Amino acid sequence: MSDSQSPSSGPRSDSVFQENLKDWVRGHIGGQTWEFPPNRLSQLLSAKTRKLATTTQTANTPPIILQNHHIAIDTIENYDCYIDTLADAVANAQNNFIERRPSQCLRSTYGDERSHHPGLVKFLNTALDSCKAGLGNEVQQAIYKELKFYVWDKPAQDGLDSAHPLKPALAGVLGEEELDSLFWIPPLEGRGMKIPGEVNGNWTELVTHAATYARVLFSATPLRQYALVIGYNPKERAMRFLVFHRGGLTASKPLELDSEQGQKDLILLLLSILTWKSLADAGFPTWCNENESQVHLPAIYSTPVTMHSELHHSPCIRGRAAHVYYLHIPHLADPTSAAKAVGAAPLDEYVGPVSHTQGPSETKTYDSGRSLVDVPSVENTTASISISRDLASTESPLSATRSSNPIRVNHPLKPGDYAVMKLSWIKVRGLGHKPIEPELLANCGGMFGVPRHYHSFLAHHQDDCPTTNHLFLPSDTDQTTRWDLFDADVTPDNIPEHRSLLGHVISHAGHSLESAPDFRSLLLAIVHAHLGYYNMCQMGYQHRDISIGNVLMADEPIEGAHFQIDILDDASATRDVRLNILSLCKELNISNRCTGFVIDGDMAVDWKFCFEESPSHTGDKAGTYQFMSDTLLEAQAQELDYWHSPIDDYYSFYYVAQWACICSPLNQPKDSWHLEQLREDVTRGLRARASLKVTGFLRMTLERYGALLAEARPFLRDWYRALEMLEVEWEKKREISAVAFRSMADHGLQTFLGVACKYLVVPQP
């Protein structure tokens, strides 16, 4: 699957969605399932340090940085793995374990799966005891030295992402005391899940359940590199270590626990976990101390920056998993404040989860926009963040990110300022697919309708170790490691998804269009966002992912740059169109005070590259499917080559507005059934039916559909018909070039502003 096709946010807690959770997981992971020999996986799990690059011909690959991450694929050859230095400890532990005849703990295959749980737990804990004995005193340095498995098989005390609490068969936690309660995000005195375990006689079913646990682990600690689940198949008496990451699943080949080799392999993999001496070794970021709400961005500010609150959370396993945080630059009145900020916190201490409404399943990292809430008051410094205190490293303070200086800083951040940080796992597509978002934000940030951009960086979870999933993936051509688990078609789209964690810091956030206080405010924000999109087009970029989560509004106007079009030497065929755009903007009283913004740039393209530097480029399809044009969806369904054009983005703006009008809480009809059905249509895959109701001639009364939708419907109807006429004109030409696309952007903006004026400009008496 491509980025535009892989769903990211999971089902809501509604019963119908909960029943479909397993189907969603299978489709979500798709064909991105791989299996490695145990010795290879043990190296990947082991604590490791990156080898220093040299200038000789045998040099190792230099550290991956922002400028080269799209072409540099990290490999295990770049690392010294600590497990490789423990040959004697591994052999001693293996011999100790085998001498205990551990397979006697395992039941034969009769009986239900629950009957295998006690013996399996005894088997695993015996293996851990042998590992600790093999390590000797060195085990005292392991952060998981108290790891122990327990039979659980009942719901945990908490659920995440609006899902019902899950009930893993086994629970790997820290501590010897009897396990009477279990949390994914435990309170101060609770015990938290470290390594879940699942038992099932069918690998497909087992992995499906295990994936739901991994999804919750990622939500509990969003910036971790991977989530580990142990799976046991009693019919085969085989175990797998299941490593879920942002590119899918990488598992160990089955460990046959009746065999001596299988038992040795189990010891090797468990010992790899016991090599973790810091949380960075376990794949957690040390540049971000989320339990204390701190992040280190040295290119922007010399001391840790406060993570004031979580604005956006996209629960998923595979995909971009976008996270957005509201940052506050601290005042340094207390000279010890920086030292306090990076101090370690006890393991298993947590703050409460953020409250948000889960969005529907979709094609792109996305969370219905409802979690993109308005910025809280500055006094609310105890904002809830659903992140474990485990992320506070007990070994070292926050480390600097290995990233370049900002491409452009419009003005320096200073104590007391606020900003927004977005983090997402961007797919590494190789030469010819350089991610454009950092460049787009740097060149367009601060223009009307686009937030100011401060900095972009590639996250490193410890010194010189980039936060990627590269090590858990085979090469693009290595099909011997493919685990055909979900019967997914093996296509070019199923090559390994190498992803890197990229961060962007921008000047401000907003809230969802759904929460607009009235229709006029909503429409004005959409006008301003259109101008932001057009500004990107003026700079040669096309956004290609206009969605409810990427078009935001602010209650109070934010002052910035004036909207302008350079037409002094414009000899193009659309010069008159651009002059008319400026005239319409004057009629709409557009100034430098902006309430609507376009954010994000994950799917953006640079027209210069597409049409000039890469003439063989055939175009592709991108976006969030609830907001993609019908033509784009049809091309995607039929796997046709298709140039995603500005007309598709303008249709996306329409569908964003339609969604916001239908989902607005201002709609409070007396009979809510009809509105609820419309909301079901627009959010859960029947958008065409919703659009037919909104734009057709069916009577929609205030009593059935609510106030805001009733007021907005004439505008939506006029706008949709104007778009259809614009599309007809475009189909007559269908010219594929940067000039043609810019012309289409001109005509599309003129068309929209003309419709908007009818509803925003008060006629003069």
Image (cartoon, helix red, strand yellow):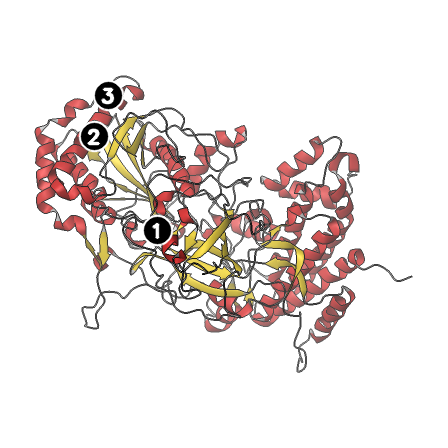
Q: Which mark lies nearer to you, 2 or 1?
A: 1
Judged from the image, the secondary structure of the residue bearing numbered disc 3 is: loop
- Quick check: marks 2 and 1 in contact, CB under 8 Å? no
| Three-letter code, disc 3 | Thr
In the picture, the disc for residue 109 is 3
Q: Nearer the viewer, residue 412 or 429?
A: 412
Q: Is residue 4 visible?
A: no
| Side (left or right) of 63 relative to 614 | left
User: Residue 731's x, y, as percent?
Assistant: 65, 61
Closer to the eye: label 1 or 3? 1
Q: Mark 1 belongs to which amino acid? A: Gly
**Which numbered disc, 2 or 1, marks the residue that appears first in the sequence?**
2
Does the image show residue 348? yes
Badge 1 crowding class, 10 Å Cα cut-off, few under 14, some 14 to 19, many 20 or more, is some
Look at the picture and state if 244 lies above or below 720: above
Please provide percent x and percent y for residue 471. Answer: 28, 53
Q: Which residue is mark 1?
A: 343
Q: Could you classify mark 3 by the number of other residues whose Cα lies within 10 Å: few (under 14), some (14-19), or many (20 or more)?
A: some
Placement of the C terminus among the 4 image quadrants: bottom right
Disc 2 marks which residue? Answer: 125
